[in-house]
């Protein structure tokens, strides 16, 4: 078993890390560089930053916080929100990020995935999918921070994204986001069984057993969480010790 990555997710709005439930009820947490350094020093394998209002505000990613984070941490991090051109990729990577995550822009222009993969390498291109279960029992892709129903099937979109050159997929369940009752293992299993790139689980962590369950049931490569880390409910080093004790390989 390859070591599973533990990845704090930091949603950024107006230069601050925030957190909500199902993309609502947003509360302030801390400065991105401060929280990023804390996680870098305390067991996180990677970090993911989302500029959560960039797409809905129709603006570019805020590069100021990207540079501040890069100056403070020594682990890989990806940045999403607002990247819609190769020039955006260039600026985000130039300011210190290791990967760029695309969601809304990739839905509008799928060729962006191919172009970015060819220019920067698949390892730099992350397809982020916000998915919500529909009344047919499958999952639909949403964009603009969960505000817009695209009508796209989430599993089919994941497969297409990989075929275009995405080197990693982050799958966030809108239904589970911030609810702390476990990850959407059904959705994740559907995707991990169809693609051959790393899949990162997002949305639903509430206790340590949820991290164990999502690896065992869905075979994801990384587990992303936000509020349980931000508010001190789960310590990353203790989480890794728990996972290793349960036979799951992690980096210590």
Image (tube, rainbow, N blue to C red):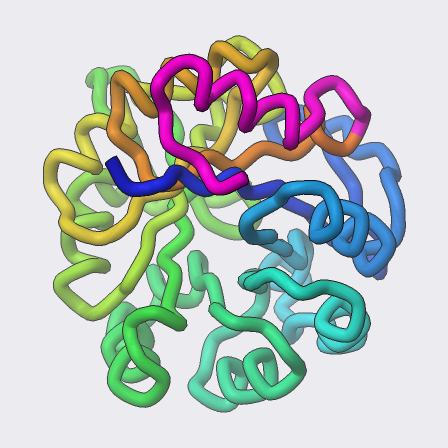
Q: For the C terminus, which image quadrant?
A: top right
Q: How many marks?
A: 0
The one of 191 and 24 positioned closer to us in this rendering: 191
User: In the figure, is residue 50 to the left or right of 99?
Assistant: right
Seen at 44% across and 59% down, the residue is: 104
| Image location (x, y in percent) of residue 100 | 48, 69
Q: Is residue 200 above or below residue 16?
A: above
| Image location (x, y in percent) of residue 54 | 65, 63
Rendered image quadrant of residue 94: bottom right
Rendered image quadrant of residue 111: bottom left
Seen at 37% across and 68% down, the residue is: 125
Residue 181 in view, yes or no: yes
Q: Is residue 60 above or below residue 248?
A: below
Seen at 23% across and 59% down, the residue is: 161
The verdict on residue 107 being magenta is no
Magenta range is: 231-252
Rendered image quadrant of residue 187: top left
User: In the figure, is residue 73 to the left or right of 200?
Assistant: right
Q: For the N terminus, which image quadrant?
A: top left
Seen at 77% across and 27% down, the residue is: 25
Q: Is residue 75 above or below residue 24?
A: below
User: In the figure, is residue 9 to the left or right of 156?
Assistant: right
| Image location (x, y in percent) of residue 194 | 11, 40
The verdict on residue 247 being magenta is yes
The one of 92 and 219 positioned closer to us in this rendering: 219
| Image location (x, y in percent) of residue 43 | 64, 42
């Amino acid at each position: 078993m390859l070591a599973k990555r533990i990845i704090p997710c930091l949603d950024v709005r107006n230069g601050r890390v925030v957190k909500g439930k199902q993309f609502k009820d947003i509360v302030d947490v801390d400065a991105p560089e401060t929280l990023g350094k804390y996680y870098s020093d305390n067991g996180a394998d990677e970090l993911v930053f989302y500029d959560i209002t960039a797409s809905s505000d129709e603006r570019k990613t805020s590069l100021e916080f990207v540079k501040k984070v890069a100056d403070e941490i020594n682990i890989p991090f990806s940045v999403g929100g607002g990247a819609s051109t190769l020039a955006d990729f260039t600026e985000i990577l130039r300011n210190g990020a290791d990967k760029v995550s695309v969601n809304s822009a990739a839905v509008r222009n799928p060729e962006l995935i191919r172009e970015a993969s060819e220019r920067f390498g698949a390892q730099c291109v992350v397809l982020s999918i916000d998915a919500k279960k529909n009344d047919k029992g499958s999952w639909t892709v949403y964009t603009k921070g969960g505000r817009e129903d695209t009508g796209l099937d989430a599993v089919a979109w994941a497969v297409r994204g990989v075929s275009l050159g995405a080197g990693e997929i982050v799958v966030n369940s809108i239904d589970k986001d911030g609810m702390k009752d476990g990850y959407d293992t059904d959705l994740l299993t559907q995707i991990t069984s169809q693609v051959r790139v790393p899949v990162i689980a997002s949305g639903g962590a509430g206790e340590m057993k949820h991290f164990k369950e999502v690896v065992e049931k869905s075979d994801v490569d990384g587990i992303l969480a936000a509020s349980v880390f931000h508010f001190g409910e789960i310590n990353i080093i203790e989480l890794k010790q728990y996972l290793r004790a349960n036979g799951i390989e992690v980096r210590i």
